[in-house]
Image: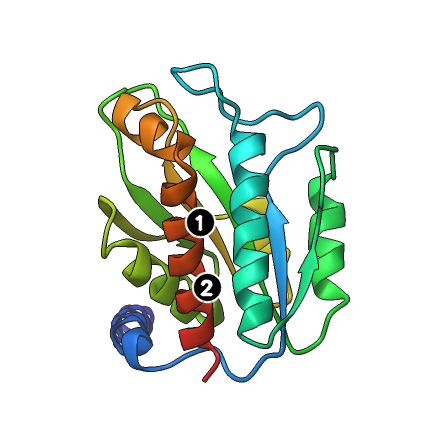
Amino acid sequence: MRSLFCAALLSVTVVFLTGCASTRGVGRFHTVVLDAGHGGIDRGAKGVDGSTEKKYALDTAKRVERGLKRAGYRVVMTRKGDYFIALPSRVAISNRRSGAVFVSIHYNWARRSSASGTETFYYNLKSYPLAANIQRELARFTGNRGVKRSRFHVLRNNARPSALVECGFLSNSSDARKARSSSYRQRVAGAIVRGIVKSSR
C-alpha cells in the first residue's frame, strides 16, 4: 500500500511540476552551452534531398549564438566547424560551466516519411522548463510533436539544465524543403533564443 501511495504521489508531483513549467524557468543563468549535433565523420541524418543534418545543425546553432549574444548571454559552442566531437566531450564542456544551461540542436529522421514537425527532449525535472519553453516557441509556426523525456547521453549525463531540440524531419519532403531555407532556420533559431531567455527566471 505504501509503495502504491508513493507512486501516486510521484505521479501527482510530476503532473504538477510539468503543468507549472509555462510560468517558471530553471533559475538565473548567464551562460548557454550550444551543441550543434554531429559533425565531421558523423554526418547525422541524411535528407530526402541529400542534405546532411550536421550542416543544418551547425548553421542553426550559429544563428542561436548570435541571438543569445545580442540578448547579453555568454555562449560556449561545443563545435564551431565541421569536425567530430565525442558525446562525453560535449557533456564535459557543459559540466565545467557553472551558471549555465545546455541546448543541443538537431534535425530529425524517421522511417515513416510522413513524420514531421519539431520536438524537444529533456531528461530530469529541472530541465523540463527549458525544454517546454523552447518547444512552446517552436510550436507557434511548426508542427508540434511536443516535449518528451529521453535518456540521450548529452541529457542524462549533464549536470546542467539541458534540452535537445529536433528542428524538423529531413526524412519528410516538406520539412526538408523548409530546412533548406535560411529564413526557416532563422525562425527556428529565433524561437530557440526566446525559449532560452524565458527560462532564465
Res 149 seen here: no
Whether residue 190 is situated above or below residue 133 in the rendered picture: above
Name the spot of residue 119 as percent of width and height, x first: 34, 47
Horizontal side of residue 165 vs 3, given as left or right: right
Furthest residue toward front? 183
At 56% from the left and 27% from the top, the residue drawn is 44
Q: Which residue is mark 1?
A: 165
Horizontal side of residue 110 vs 102, given as left or right: left
Name the spot of residue 182 as percent of width and height, x first: 43, 39
Quarter residue 37 falls in: top right
Name the spot of residue 86 as percent of width and height, x first: 73, 39
**Which mark, by number, is residue 193?**
2
Horizontal side of residue 46 vs 38, given as left or right: left
Q: Which of 119/66 is in front? A: 66
Give the amino acid at mark 2.
Val
Give the amino acid at mark 1.
Val
Quadrant the N terminus occupies: bottom left
Whether residue 60 is situated above or below residue 82 in the rendered picture: below
Answer yes or no: do the residues labelled 1 and 2 have beta carbons within 8 Å?
no
Whether residue 116 is situated above or below residue 18 in the rendered picture: above
Judged from the image, the secondary structure of the residue bearing numbered disc 2 is helix
At 56% from the left and 70% from the top, the residue drawn is 70
Name the spot of residue 143 as percent of width and height, x first: 22, 44
* Structural distance between the alpha carbons of marks 1 and 2: 12 Å
Query: Callout 1: 10 Å neighbours few (<14), some, many (20+)?
Result: many
Quarter residue 77 falls in: bottom right
Horizontal side of residue 198 vs 2, given as left or right: right
Judged from the image, the secondary structure of the residue bearing numbered disc 1 is strand
At 45% from the left and 53% from the top, the residue drawn is 189
Quarter residue 101 falls in: bottom right
